[in-house]
Image: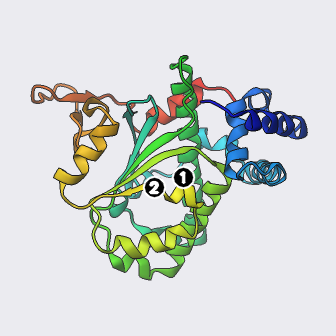
Amino acid sequence: MSLTEEELELVEQLRTSTSSLLTPTESQDDAFLVRWIRARNNDLQLAEEMLKNSITWRSTNSISSLPTKEINPIFTEKFPRKLEGHDKEGRPVTTIPFGLWDAAYTVSTPEVTTEFREYTFQGCELLMNAIKEADQKNPDSRITQFVIIIDMAGFSFMTLLNVYAVQLGLSMLSEYEANYPETLSSCFLINCTSAIGMLLNLVKGALAEKTFNKIKVLGTSMDEWQPALLDAIEENELSVQFGGVRLDCDEGVEVEEGVECLDDNSDDDEFVEASEEVVE
């Protein structure tokens, strides 16, 4: 990551004004501080306000404790997510079969909504830890972002009719934008049908323009989306479902030649390992 002279100057000013609020690691990390500068288009006052608001948000919601918080297993069943490998630049890749998610369940009770928010931001925190771990393993280049692949297969227009679920989702997208700025490298939406248009119109209002512009919409044909994914990610870094050659294999199960097995730590367990290895 390279910073311009203007960014370096602004980073120093932001460091001075917020050092008492940050951890020593954060305060000394130019890559961390410049995220807020860039998110506010080099407006120091707005960047400082954004960072301070995020610090308050993290404290109010006990965000730092989420990586090790035990979450009800029903959320991993209804809302699966997986940490795959890394893209060709070394960034962590995460995948979500969003089309299969049970959106209505997220707003079934206030308690479920609270737990779903915790589960979602736990995922964000674990991704940030995966980024830090990848960065530590790549001394020649800074790793500060992640790649996400969202499988829309199964997504229905009917999902958008649940106003409360849509409002919750958009609210959490806005929270992501406000508290994890400049962490998204690219977002691939695969297996998209015509219903994606209305969803994107809603999402556009919750994300910054430059974040929204990182979304790549791909159709239902594997011949269309697989080359796009493999252009950015080696096939041995992706599971078969997403066009790669890796499988979740039980011990002793034979697989075809050329197919690699994901180990037991390839999903949220791997996220947890990252959280344990990286100390803020």
Q: Are marks 2 and 1 in contact (CB under 8 Å)?
A: yes
Q: Is residue 115 visible?
A: no
Q: Does residue 7 appear left or right of residue 272 in this picture?
A: right
Kindly state the secondary structure of the residue where label 2 is placed. Answer: helix
The amino acid sitting under disc 2 is Phe
Mark 1 = which residue? 119
On screen, residue 210 versus residue 245, left or right, reads: right
Q: Nearer the viewer, residue 177 or 273?
A: 177
How many discs appear?
Answer: 2
Where is residue 3? Give x, y as percent.
Answer: 67, 32
- Tag 2 residue: 75
Q: Quadrant of residue 253?
A: top left
- Residue 196 horizontal/vertical position (percent): 36, 70
Tell which circle, 2 or 1, labels the residue nearer the N-terminal end.
2
Taking 10 as reference, is 170 above or below it?
below
Instruction: Say which element carries label 1.
Output: helix
Q: Which mark is residue 170?
A: none
